[in-house]
Image (tube, rainbow, N blue to C red):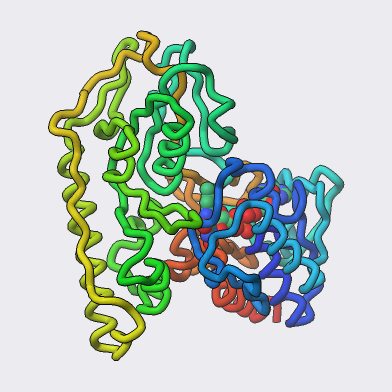
């Protein structure tokens, strides 16, 4: 039994069918439900179209260097579900999975079933991670997450405080600022990247140089690699870079990491300059590694000359406190990360922090597997283009186990 009909669950189904394994894909909504219901209206993929690949299906439209809007992503995944004839039962919410003789007992909103193996493909971004101090924010301020935010018109009047400067936070800060509101962005640790490097999409470099293929058993600190923030990237027709300098130019006010709430005030860290310097350093190291790869692999001619980008220029001084009850801010958007929802999983496979215990997708329980988690087997595991190798390997394990 496969939980979830996103691209990961469907890819699992494709390989199960190839190996003649009887199975069903249970989906609480529709195929590609997360892309239909849990993303904001203006979102486009940050991966270019030529990188949108599923087993046996590549992007074949007129704009390989473009970035899909949500409707196109849904269509792409639906097309895949049809092509692989995935046995999806939509409108079927899995409410409990627990061990039973010879496998697992599964309860759903539409009845019960027994299976020998379970593939967890319910997604890595079902819940928004919000710090505990959000509970202390005055009730006059509206609070949203990327799962509830659709567009600027939804927010009450007044300024917006966006928390988190990874892909989601920088995109929402820019969109809110362009809608005419004052926007403050609280910036913690982040990953700065140019959209285009030496004339090539920066993800071309990640893909071709092998950075994205680094395996889970090759990295020094796997726990940290799995929690790395998403890069500051946006997919726009003009392939613009959306880093902190770009946001400052738009008129977004940058402050440090939001550390606490005291009485009615948000308290921000004074360390913005340091996190910016660290992000610049890491970006330059990565670009130097790309240069070295191009030189050593004889691929120089495929890109323009090496470039370096101006350092991030944080404000000369940042405010350390903001009165949330003073009327300056009408809403807060928490772009502080996502996590999977395992509340329905009655199997002891979570660690003390609620994370799934698995080794490259082989979960720490007989016959249980996972797909689609960050850095699950490789750096590209949580992206659409990373599913083929992961699903093939994980289903290979599953089949070997059954036999
Ligand atoms: C904001 C955002 C932007 C992203 N941008 C990109 C990008 O540009 N490029 C890229 O390659 N990747 C991107 N990703 C990452 C990744 O591709 C998506 O998260 C993708 O949706 C993951 O696919 P999945 O199949 O693992 O999970 P999902 O697409 O989330 O599919 C899981 C499915 O399981 C269902 N489900 C969950 N729980 C249950 C249950 N208990 N019972 C039944 N059904 C259940 C859900 O309804 C859903 O349909 C982005 C992610 C986010 C959050």
The residue at the point 33 percent across, 33 percent down is 252
Nearer the observer, 87 or 162:
162
Q: In the image as oriented, which residue stretches furthest toward the right?
A: 111
57 sits to left or right of 268 = right
Q: What is the x, y in percent for residue 345?
A: 63, 48
Q: Is residue 247 above or below residue 61?
A: above
Number of marks in the image? 0
In which quadrant will I find the C terminus? bottom right
* Near-viewer residue (38 or 399): 38
Give the camera-side residue of 266 and 363.
Answer: 266
Q: Residue at x 76, y 47 (%)?
A: 29
Examine the rendering and report whether any part of residue 227 can be seen.
no
Q: Answer with the quarter of the image where residue 12 lies.
A: bottom right
Task: Decide: is 59 above or below 370.
Answer: below
| Residue 180, picture quadrant | top left
Residue 120 position, x and y percent, is 63, 58
For image coordinates 51% across by 68% down, the residue present is 65
The answer to whether residue 20 is above or below residue 70 is: below
Residue 139 vertical placement versus 353 (above, below): above
Residue 249: quadrant of the picture: top left
Image location (x, y in percent) of residue 251: 32, 33
User: Residue at (18%, 34%) from the top-left corner?
Assistant: 315
Residue 129 locus on image (x, y percent): 47, 38
Residue sitting farthest toward the bottom: 298
Q: Is residue 162 visible?
A: yes
Q: Quadrant of the N terminus?
A: bottom right
Q: In the depicted view, which residue is nearer to us: 81 or 93?
A: 81
């Amino acid at each position: 039994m496969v939980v979830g009909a996103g691209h990961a669950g469907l890819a699992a189904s494709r390989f199960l069918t190839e190996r003649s394994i009887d199975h069903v894909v249970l989906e609480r909504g529709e195929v590609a439900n997360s892309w239909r219901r849990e993303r904001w209206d203006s979102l486009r993929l940050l991966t270019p179209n030529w990188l949108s690949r599923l087993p046996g299906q590549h992007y074949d439209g007129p704009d390989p260097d473009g970035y899909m809007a949500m409707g196109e992503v849904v269509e792409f995944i639906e097309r895949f579900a049809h092509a692989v004839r995935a046995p999806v039962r939509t409108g079927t919410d899995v409410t409990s999975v627990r061990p039973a003789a010879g496998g697992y007992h599964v309860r759903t909103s539409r009845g019960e079933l027994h299976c020998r193996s379970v593939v967890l493909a319910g997604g890595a971004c079902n819940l928004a991670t919000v710090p505990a101090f959000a509970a202390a924010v005055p009730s006059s301020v509206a609070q949203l997450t990327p799962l509830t935010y659709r567009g600027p018109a939804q927010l009450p009047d007044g300024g917006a405080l966006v928390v988190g400067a990874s892909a989601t936070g920088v995109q929402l800060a820019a969109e809110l600022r362009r809608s005419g509101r004052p926007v403050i962005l609280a910036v913690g640790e982040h990953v700065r990247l140019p959209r285009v490097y030496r004339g090539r999409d920066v993800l071309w470099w990640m893909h071709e140089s092998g950075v994205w293929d680094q395996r889970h058993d090759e990295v020094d600190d796997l726990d940290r690699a799995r929690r790395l923030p998403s890069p500051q990237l946006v997919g726009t027709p003009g392939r613009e870079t959306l880093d902190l300098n770009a946001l400052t130019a738009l008129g977004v006010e940058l402050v440090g990491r939001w550390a606490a709430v005291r009485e009615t005030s948000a308290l921000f860290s004074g360390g913005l300059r340091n996190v910016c310097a660290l992000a610049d350093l890491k970006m330059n190291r990565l670009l130097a590694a790309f240069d070295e790869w191009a030189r050593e692999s004889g691929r120089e001619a495929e890109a323009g000359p090496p470039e370096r980008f101006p350092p991030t220029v944080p404000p000369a001084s940042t405010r350390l406190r903001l009165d949330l009850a003073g009327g300056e801010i009408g809403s807060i958007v928490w772009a502080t990360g996502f996590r999977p929802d395992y509340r329905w999983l009655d199997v002891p496979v979570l660690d003390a922090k609620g994370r799934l215990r698995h080794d490259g997708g082989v979960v720490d329980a007989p016959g249980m597997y996972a797909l689609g988690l960050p850095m699950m087997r490789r750096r590209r595991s949580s992206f659409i283009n990373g599913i083929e190798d992961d699903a093939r390997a994980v289903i290979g394990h599953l089949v070997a186990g059954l036999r």
